[in-house]
Amino acid sequence: MIPFAIGLGVGLAIGALFALWQMSWFRSLRRYLLDAMDAIVQGRYDVRMYEYRSRPAEIAIFRHFNRMAERIQETLADLSQERDILRHILQNMTTGVIYLRSDGQVQMVNHAAERLFRRPVEQWKDRDHWTVFRNYQLGSAIDHALLFGTPWSGEFQIRDGVTVAVRLVPISAAPRMRNKADGRHDVLMLVNDVSEWRRLERMRSDFVANVSHELKTPIAAIRGFAETLLDGDVDEEAREKFLRTIYEESLRMGNLVSDLLELSKLEASDSHVDPVAVDLYEVLVRAVDRVRPVANEKEITIELPREQRLHVWAEPDLLLQVFLNLLTNAIHYSPPKSRVCVTWDVLVDRVKVHVKDNGIGIPKESLPRVFERFYRVHKDRSRASGGTGLGLAIVKHIVTALGGEVGVESEEGKGSDFWFTLSRLDARP
């Protein structure tokens, strides 16, 4: 009995020691696992559990843990790369992007929005949208989008001359708030500058209105005089006068239509301009030959530069049109027995051509607008001379298409100097 009791005691002691050892091992393993998981929680995703001198059971656990850590590290690396790509795309977009949190505060803004609103990012983040966008309609739309998820789009002016189109895109805040959003929404605000589009629309509308107005006058004159002639109670002298007026108005209307077609053709073929080497003096002489009869009627002398073989990069017919329009314009606005002088300055890689007159000049406030379509400084005089108001607009369009610049220097009562530049093809002076 005594040996059995001794054996039992020894066995129980050994079992107790083994149990204590197992508990110590389990605590050590548990501590190792907790330390490794704490490291991952703290953002150290490169932590791994080593298998050196480990039991088979431990090795299996360590390997599963390491695979999990590697997967987390790879996933976060992919997400980080995607985030960086999206950030680059966002910051280089021309569309302004503003992200509003469900509490109405600005959370993110890109560079385009900073430039549009002229407000640095420091004045956006964590600020209520009412303090950033001082527009009642926009603020009300943002509140509706935040509370009810109502999308909205519209336009408003943020400052003089700048109109923006705004689109509000509601996004459910539930994923971000772990399903505790209670139906609230974040809002993505997209902003585009549409000032240039609206300006072009106004120009198109003004263009149609101007064309209608310009055609209305000659049509009314032709119709009125034609009705008078049809009545038959007109003497021969009045009849001839009326017919001459009808003829002149029809010419004016024809010139207007011709200039409109020319301008339309130029706009349609902007990308098809094919400049070649052109003798500048030769084209000028051709233009002067065409306008000389009109100049002779007013006894106006056209002075040319001394013959100089200078080649420019242009299309001969388009360059001829530029000279014709500028010379005709100078003759019409110059007094009888005056001079129109054509000169040019030879620069390093360009030629600056001047067409000067001693006419009535242009008021200072009208200088920025003389190249606009249908703009006339002296409306009555322009119509009396048969002008359509499109000549200088055609000049600017042609010179711009040829890669040059155009401008005017003038003083009221002292004449005008219209100039344009073209690329020269000769050697350096």
Image (cartoon, rainbow, N blue to C red):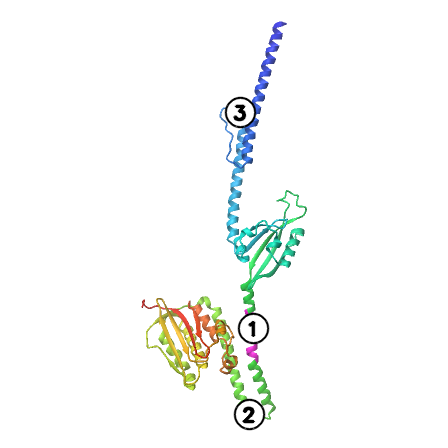
Which is more foreground, mark 3 or mark 2? 2
Residue range corresponding to the magenta coloring: 203-216
Q: Residues within 10 Å of mark 3 (few under 14, many from 20)?
A: few
Q: Quadrant of residue 57?
A: top right
Q: Secondary structure at mark 3?
A: helix
What type is the residue that disc 2 sits on? Answer: Ala
Q: N-terminal of the two: label 2 or label 1?
A: 1
Q: Quadrant of the C terminus?
A: bottom left
**Label 3: which residue?**
56
- Residue 267 in picture, x, y percent from top left: 48, 69
Q: Residues within 10 Å of mark 2 (few under 14, many from 20)?
A: few
Residue at position x 59%, y 58% in the image: 166
**Label 2: which residue?**
238
**Label 1: which residue?**
208
- C-alpha gap between disc 3 and disc 1: 88 Å
Question: Residue 188 in magenta?
Answer: no
Q: Quadrant of the N terminus?
A: top right
Which is more foreground, mark 3 or mark 1? 1
Whether 231 is drawn above or below 341: the answer is below
Residue at position x 57%, y 22% in the image: 24
